[in-house]
Image (tube, rainbow, N blue to C red):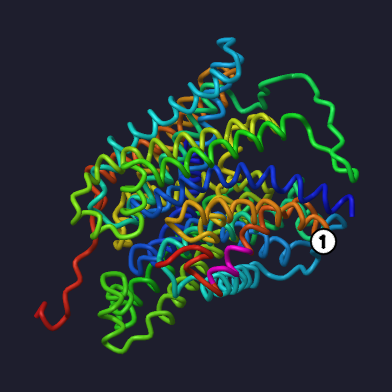
Amino acid sequence: MISYLIFFLIICGIYGIMTLGLNLQWGYTGLFNIGVAGFWAVGAYTSAILTKPPAPEHLGGFNLPFIVGLLAAAVVSGVIAFLIGIPTLRLREDYLAIATIGIAEIIRLIVKNEEWLTNGVRGISGIPKPFKSLFGNSYNLFYLILVMIALGIIYFIIQRGIKSPWGRVLRAIREDEEVARAAGKDVFRYRLESLVLGSMIMGVGGAIYAHFTSFISPEAFKPMQGTFLVWVMLIIGGSGNSLGALLGTLITWSIWSGTEILTSFLPSTITTQAAAFRVILIGVLLEVVLLTRPEGILGEDPHVSSVLKE
Amino acid sequence: MVLLLQLISNGIILGCIIALGSIGLSLLYGILKFGNFAHGDMMTLGAYFAFLFKVQLGMPMWAAFVLAMLLTAFVAVIVDQVIYKSLRKSDSIILLIASVGIALILRNFIQLIWGPQNHFYDKGIQMPIQLGLGVRVKPNQILILVVTVALVIFVHLFLTKTKMGKAMRAMSDNMDLAKVTGINTEQVIKWTWVLGAVLTAAAGILLGIDTHLLPSMGWNLLLPLFAATILGGIGSPYGAMLGGLVIGVSQELSTLVIPPTYKPGVAFLIMLLMLLIKPTGLMGRSV
């Protein structure tokens, strides 16, 4: 039971990192990224390839330390976000949505087809678990602490950024682009920074995921499912509120894995139906929240100038 | 040379299917101001409704075709009334998120009812017909072309000759002007959903006739649908037809130079190029 709880919290923490990244893009800047799973995959594969011992089936054998893998995952995700942002961020906001779907699809195709790089559909196994030898049986507990530290650092960075002048510009752009522009702000640059930083966070989340499961394959990233869950987490908790994003993650993941436990008691002949039913349930939940409480459970945290507070 | 002609011919067939789907997507985009991410899954729904009538209930194909189109339109109007109608006053992105949710619900509903495996309208294998110059087509592909042309003529007449069609174009062109002239916008929105759903259901059924049915078939076409819509210019039904054909033919021709598995990437690249060069599209006016 305890071990299941630890496992549950680790996955929850990884989703929490994703949701924080998305909250920066959508909640604070109004950027619609539905390619979350793409950045997830990029982060996971980048770190896996860089940290693994040599494997004949695919690129690898660099044996780099875990932390280098994490950083590289962030950098590669950031570069891809940068490239996708340049043509789309000057245009209407929904073009970015379509473009991110496109990039996620292309990433999926590359991961699936370029066997020399990713071993194709067979996936990459034996991804090193950092400090595995030190912790042995209580390894998951150690990893949970690791995930929570990463989550804490990311949370801290985002909160600092959001409360800074930089964060105020982001929110100004979200509320009214023209006003921000009239105030002399380079709207495009701020948007690009938010997109890149948010995607880097997702890349780190992907890497942490890969080192936990130690096996990744195209099948592991059901793109729409992963992206959709992260979105539902953010919407339910409250966009524009990092704490809300984390609360939404906890609630949504509880429902998601709770229904998984329930359906596991059903006969195996209807498992695919049960899986479909779970997605429908989450979809209905999203629509209900959008219709009845579009600001989410917590809503956006009020931003009051420190001068006014005193 | 033969290969080139064959690829163009395949591309036109694919282009027909994409065009039918993107006409509705483009009109809805123009009138409701949001990209309907559930459009591909509506396509799938249409295809499976036809499967229900044709294979499971044993009706003739033409009847299944018509009934499936109507039933899909009915579902689209219901979804609009229950979900989108209350959200019309919110930001267009909220509608977009809602449509992503609808897409997931539809696809998994299909998987729940009909299962994840392939389905076929007909089990038999068709012998290809020689068209001359070494180009071969299946009789079904000629059927796809004929049905598409018929539907496109129908759409053209509807948009240019009927009051409702003119109102649709007016709303898509300039919403405020249309409202001032006293157009009943809710009524037009309802009929736009009907038209869009009928066409996308037809596209799904034709795709099912050409290949097979799969819960993800429409979702996989969503990117080409959006590419065709943007290429043609959002809100322009004629642009969408042209865009569909361009995307279809380019996807097939791309197999000359890149592995066929990257076909969906071609639609994406064309879309990105269009956004960079002329974001209003080939036949659009405003972004």
* Residue named by callout 1: B257
Q: Chain of mark 1?
A: B
Q: Furthest-bottom residue in view?
A: A184
Does the magenta-highlighted stretch encompass residue B273? Answer: yes
Image point 66% across, 44% down: which residue? Answer: A219
Image coords of residue B97 (percent x, y): 38, 50
Q: Furthest-top residue in view?
A: B58
Q: Nearer the viewer, residue A8 or B195?
A: B195
Would you identify the image quadrant in which residue A177 lies?
bottom left
Q: What are the residue bounds of the magenta stretch?
A: B270-275
Image coords of residue A39 (percent x, y): 57, 61
Does the magenta-highlighted stretch encompass residue B250? Answer: no
Residue A124 visible within the image = no
Instruction: Examine the rendered structure and indicate whether residue B75 appears above or below residue A178.
Output: above
Amino acid type, residue under disc 1 in the picture: Val
Instruction: Examine the rendered structure and indicate whether residue A292 appears above or below residue A31.
Output: above
Residue A304 visible within the image = yes
Q: Is residue A58 left or right of residue A80?
A: right
Image point 32% across, 54% down: which residue? Answer: B170
Q: Nearer the viewer, residue B279 or A245?
A: B279
Q: Nearer the viewer, residue A135 or A218?
A: A218
| Quarter of the image with the C terminus of chain B in it | bottom left
Image coords of residue A14 (percent x, y): 49, 55
